[in-house]
Amino acid sequence: MFKLNVNIIYGENSLAKLPEILKDYGFTYPGILCDKNVYSNSNYVREQIDQLLPHRNNLLFYDFPFEPSYQFLDKKIADIREKELDKKVDVWIGLGGGSTIDTAKGIAVLCNNDGPSINYKGFPTAINVPIPIIAIPSTTGTGSEVVYNASFIDEDTKIKMGINFNKNYPILAILDPRIPSCAPLQVLASSGCDALVHTLESFMSKETNEHVRMFAKRSYELIMANMKPLLMGEQGMDKWLNMQWAAVYAMFALSNSTSGPTGALSYYLGAHYKVSHGIAGGVFIGKVIEYNHNNGYYDLSLLYEGNNQDELNDDKKSKSVINEIKELLELANIPEELAVFGVKESDYNGFNEFARQAKAAFEFNPVPIDLNCVSKLLIK
């Protein structure tokens, strides 16, 4: 089974259609959770929100310095309940990166379910249906706008689980390239690497299939054709929109396949060293694909688009793709050494211990990895 459950409106200035969209859906009292930096730095976003919510009574900001936690979510829902927005708002709109959209999903669940957010960690089932969500991404990486999953970290245990309820799909995603185009290029570097990781891990997973690979291949093509010129300073709304679609296609692939060692290790690096998920993924993905190649895995050759297809064997095609990926990571200023993030050699055993706990993710990798020395294979 290949599952898709999403409606998408896309194109330049599509955010401006939001009042009409809400009217068509019959919503009369929207609540907006907006990334504070996006609201502050984008005149376009600010103007659209201020026109929609002139009194701002139901406008909240995502202003957490890192990925969302259950504790942060509880603070937000406490504010919402104090204002009685949980009884008034009939649709929540998440406008921002994956962290903002995930938090909006968590709010949607807690507005219709009592108690602290930690009660709903993992994959809850017997709970009330959440308030509807509209997702408007400001980045080009997570794909949170087309899935029900929402990631949250427990600040006490540093464990990342999330609130993943299968009736919490956004009812609509709006892809407006004007929104990500306003962000600094380091945001593109991080979010683009996130989409790249989703693409490559779903493509390589033992659970992949022809449909997953179709979406993953299209995502890879869009990333390589558009992320590089954008990082080099070229502009064009078509390039930004293509990157938004790359993130969507990558998540279509990932949500119908599995993550792997890169996703797992990036969670650990992020939770323990405060590294953004996209950058953390970028650190590991180059190491993982090279490790796989050096151990006889050449399926990345299927992503090769050179003119000399008949002249190269799978080994050389795969190596060419890996070099292309590494060039992109270098252009995105992704560090190769974990010392940049404060990781000491004495800390490496923590990655090994985590790998043993996250054994399932590593088992989806097409090449076996010794979990007792994952640091030696993937970190150095």
Image: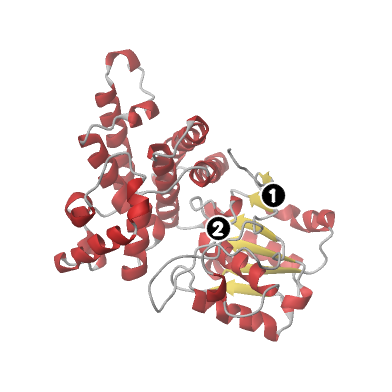
Characterize the local packing of mark 1: few (<14), some (14-19) or many (20 or more) Cα atoms within 10 angstroms: some
Q: Is residue 182 left or right of residue 88?
A: left
Residue name at image x 39 percent, y 29 percent:
303
User: Which mark identifies residue 233?
Assistant: none
Q: Amino acid at mark 2?
A: Asn
For disc 1, the marked residue is 14
Give the image location of residue 41, x and y in percent: 54, 65
Give the image location of residue 13, x and y in percent: 68, 50
Residue name at image x 19 percent, y 63 percent:
348
Q: Amino acid at mark 1?
A: Ser
Give the image location of residue 98, x and y in percent: 52, 59
Q: Is residue 77 above or below residue 43?
A: below
Q: Are marks 1 and 2 in contact (CB under 8 Å)?
A: no
Q: CA distance from mark 1 to mark 2?
A: 24 Å
Can residue 333 be seen in the rendering of this structure?
no
Q: Nearer the viewer, residue 169 or 197?
A: 169
How many numbered circles does the render carry?
A: 2
Q: Is residue 277 left or right of residue 10?
A: left
Can residue 136 be seen in the rendering of this structure?
yes
Q: Where is the N terminus found, in terms of image quarters?
A: top right
Residue name at image x 43 percent, y 70 percent:
66
Q: Nearer the viewer, residue 235 or 353?
A: 353
Label 1 element class: helix
Given the current orientation, which residue lies at the most extreme bottom position? 82
Label 2 element class: loop
Q: Is residue 85 above or below residue 135?
A: below
Give the image location of residue 21, x and y in percent: 78, 54
Given the current orientation, which residue lies at the most extreme front position? 126
Residue name at image x 33 percent, y 55 percent:
359
For disc 2, the marked residue is 149
Q: First in sequence, mark 1 or 2: give its number.
A: 1
* Mark in front: 1 vs 2: 2
